[in-house]
Amino acid sequence: MKALSPASSKHYLPSPLGWIQVELSEQGIHRFWFVDQLPESDLSRSGEGEQAQLLEKLKTQVAEYFAGQRRQFDLPLAPRGTEFQQSVWKALCRIPYGQTWSYAQLAQSIGQPRASRAVGMANSRNPIGLLVPCHRVIGKNGQLTGYAGGLERKAWLLEHEQRCTESG
């Protein structure tokens, strides 16, 4: 596992789906993923200066999302990946709240209609789940397919967004 640079920090946020581990730096949010267990040694880490402000903004926006009050995140994201992965992750952010696309639709949206499998691989390597909404991608047949946070969380997120869309 790659060590954090001195300018990076890890934080943990509670959510209705379990704890979320976040990695921040001056560039923005590098990682955001669900964890099933908190390592006790990391519970008290906190950022300073700009990172503290970013962490507070992140906490607020995540809480608003889970309360059904936020449909888009307005945060500096800095995922690390190849140029192709970056293009897929940007396209994920264009999937409207409460809707789903297939891997084929996602591949089409980046101008590579034959790259469904490669798009699927890039999607699976999304280091900023939820903020870059990879949970909104489903199989061509409408089936829920892989999600690093688990299919139960993916189903919950999609149902949550659908309920919030229907209620206004």
Image (cartoon, rainbow, N blue to C red):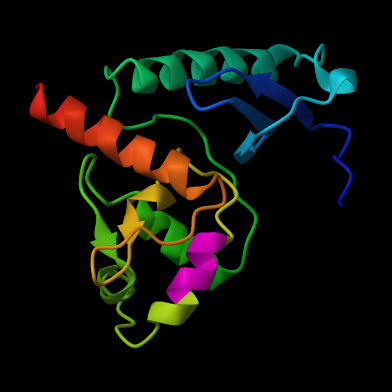
Residue drawn where x is 9% and y is 29% of the image:
166
Q: Position of residue 29 (x, y in %)?
A: 61, 36
Q: Is residue 5 visible?
A: yes
Q: Is residue 47 left or right of residue 136?
A: right
Look at the picture and state if 34 lies above or below 82.
Answer: above
Q: Is residue 17 left or right of residue 52?
A: left
Helix, strand or loop for the magenta stretch, by majority: helix
Give residue 56's quadrant in the image: top right
Q: Is residue 134 magenta?
A: no
Which quadrant holds the C terminus? top left
Look at the picture and state if 47 lies above or below 80.
Answer: above
Q: Is residue 127 left or right of residue 63?
A: right
Q: Position of residue 152 (x, y in %)?
A: 45, 42
Residue drawn where x is 40% and y is 29% of the image:
74
Residue closest to the eye, 130 or 82: 130
Q: Is residue 43 left or right of residue 63?
A: right
The residue segment tinted magenta is 119-124
Residue drawn where x is 48% and y is 78% of the image:
118
Give residue 143's quadrant in the image: bottom left
Residue closest to the eye, 68 or 51: 68
Residue drawn where x is 47% and y is 21% of the image:
16
Give residue 11's quadrant in the image: top right
Q: Position of residue 22 (x, y in %)?
A: 66, 31
Q: Is residue 25 visible?
A: no
Residue closest to the eye, 33 or 150: 150
Looking at this rendering, what residue extends furthest in the bottom direction?
114
Total numbered labels placed on residues in the image? 0
Look at the picture and state if 1 lies above or below 88.
Answer: above
Q: Position of residue 159 (x, y in %)?
A: 27, 36
Q: Is residue 122 magenta?
A: yes
